[in-house]
Image (tube, grey):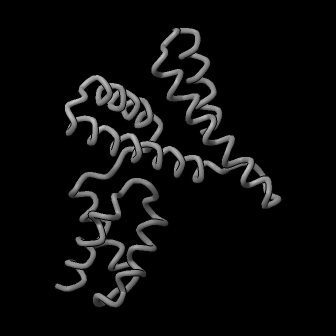
Amino acid sequence: MREEFGESLKTALKARDQCRTATLRAIAAAIKDKDIAIRQENRGPATNEEILTIVQKIVKQREESFAIYAQAGRANLATVEKEEIDILNEFLPKGLSEAEVDAAILATIAATGAEGPKDMGKVIRQLKVDYPSRIDFGKASSKVRAALAS
């Protein structure tokens, strides 16, 4: 994933795409910061999962900023945030549809042998392992709760 960002940054620099270049440089800086923090723990560079988490965090920040700018009537700033979100989403795995999430929840409940609301944590943990960054767990938790209650 790190190489993918590097190649995209080179392409953006050659194309003189300022928005894309700035966005990718921000990602590169965040990854470098993570590498430095990890180095203090005496382990190698950031893994793809850690890089994915960084990108997701940055997307979430941009989405919050977009909502604030749109609500405040700052269309020019909202447009910039939206462009950055679109660029970052190119690097994230595609999320599951509602039907796919429902099917994944039912399959995970069956696989873990969950029987009631007390097993919700077990189901969520398994979903996070099986579908990392492909499910919005804020929304999925209510679906898991409903499925376990029935």
Q: Is residue 103 left or right of residue 40?
A: left
Residue 120 in picture, x, y percent from top left: 35, 82
Q: In this picture, is 42 found above or below 61?
A: below
Residue at the (61%, 48%) spot, across then down: 48
Report the residue that reaches farthest toward the front: 72
Which residue sits furthest top? 15
Relative to residue 119, is residue 128 depicted above or below? Answer: above
Residue 16: horizontal and vertical position, in percent? 52, 9
Relative to 113, say whether 40 is above or below.
Answer: above
Identified at 30% across, 26% down, the residue is: 79
> In the image, 12: left or right of 42?
left
How many numbered discs, if any? Answer: 0
Q: Position of residue 24 (x, y in %)?
A: 54, 29
The quarter of the image holding the N terminus is top right
Q: Residue furthest left?
A: 150
Q: Nearer the viewer, residue 65 or 142?
A: 65
Foreground of the two, 81 or 148? 81
Residue 130 screen position, x and y as percent: 45, 64
> In the rendered view, does 149 fall on the left or right side of 34?
left
* Residue 59 figure quarter: top left
At 36% across and 87% down in the image, what residue appears? 119
Say which of 109 and 55 sits in front. Answer: 55
The residue under the point 32% across, 72% down is 107
Residue furthest right as drawn: 42
The C terminus sits in image quarter: bottom left
